[in-house]
Image (cartoon, grey):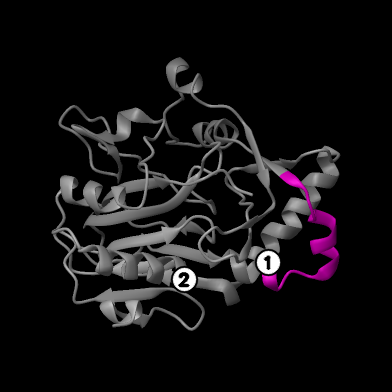
Amino acid sequence: MRQEALVKTSPLSEGFGIEVTDIDLSAPLDDAAFGALRKAWFDSGVMVVRDQALTPDAQIAFARRFGDLAIHVMDQFLLPGHPEILVLSNRKRPDGTPEGFEDAGRYWHSDISYEERPALGSQLYAVEIPPEGGDTMFQDMVRAWETLPDDLKQRIEGRRALHSYTRNHKKNETQEGGRPAISAAQGARLTDVVHPIVRTVEDTGRKALYVNPGFTWAIEGMDEAEGRALLDALFAHSRDRAFRYVHKWRPGDLLCWDNRTVMHHATMYDPAYIRHMHRTTIRGPRPV
């Protein structure tokens, strides 16, 4: 039997992304089914598996089969007893403190691109969602690279860009109702890094733009103003709606995306409703 026949898939959009059906991720998959699922995900960039009932242990076990799991620096938002899970939520504890990262991802970004070994993939499980809003938008960065004008391709050939978490976080701290400040201990874990502007994806050999408005701040070896203008041109091109998929959440969705080949952005929702999610993040190799 061909590997592709081991999982049932259907397209999410004309451009990219798949839905996998008739599968239960609360129990371990055999190696053949897992290999087929892994290939389907990385070939498509975005994959959703609906109607799941995942305990934290089951979500972690599934994610860990893809590689080492990253522990987010904002450790006050890690699920107690399960530090591999980052809680994204506007729900409050009895003492009024937030259970999770409320404003996470409300800008275009690729998860933890500011680390030496950034994310291979992320898997976000919908525990509770609002009746409308709170969607997640994705941009296909492989198509963004493939359709980039030749003059821009020439200007970024062989260049690297600087990625920083602290610069983004400090900007959001200043906004009304912004996120909590980075502690001294958290800040000690953070350093700015540089990665290639165009990376080659290990699984497929495809090339993808690897810059994002959330965490990419400068181009190595280029004047600040010139580099900023070039990044803005790359960002404008990569946000083209022709490369976009918008995910409308349902409870029980496990949404998986390849951070090497897509960037994403959460949309706003009515804060009178709860949006409560559990994210696992799979660490990848250093980009080349």
Q: Magenta residues?
A: 146-160
Q: Which x, y percent locates residue 266?
A: 43, 56
Q: How many other residues sit within 10 Å of disc 2, few (<14), some (14-19) or many (≥20)?
A: some
The secondary element bearing badge 2 is classed as helix
Q: Is residue 151 magenta?
A: yes
Residue 50 x %, y %: 23, 69
Q: Is residue 278 above or below residue 34?
A: above
For the point 42% across and 60% down, the residue is 257
Position of 243 with respect to 14 (left or right) is: right
Which tag, 1 or 2, sits closer to the chain's start? Answer: 2
Residue 43's label in the rendered image is: 2
Per the image, label 1 sits on a secondary structure element best described as helix
Residue sitting at x 37%, y 42%: 68
Q: Position of residue 262 (x, y in %)?
A: 52, 61
Residue indicated by mark 1: 145
Q: CA distance from mark 1 to mark 2?
A: 16 Å
Q: Position of residue 47 (x, y in %)?
A: 37, 68
Res 236 → quadrant: bottom right
> Which quarter of the figure is the N terminus placed in?
bottom left
Within the magenta stretch, is there residue 86?
A: no
Q: What's the mark number on residue 19?
A: none
**Residue 267 falls in image quadrant:** bottom left
Total labels drawn: 2
Amino acid type assigned to the residue bearing label 1 in the image: Trp
Identify which residue, 99 or 118, lies in the foreground: 118
The residue at the point 49 percent across, 42 percent down is: 112
Is residue 179 or residue 148 the one in the foreground? 148
Q: Given this view, does label 1 or label 2 mark the residue nearer the observer?
A: 2
Question: Which amino acid does the dot numbered 2 rest on?
Answer: Asp
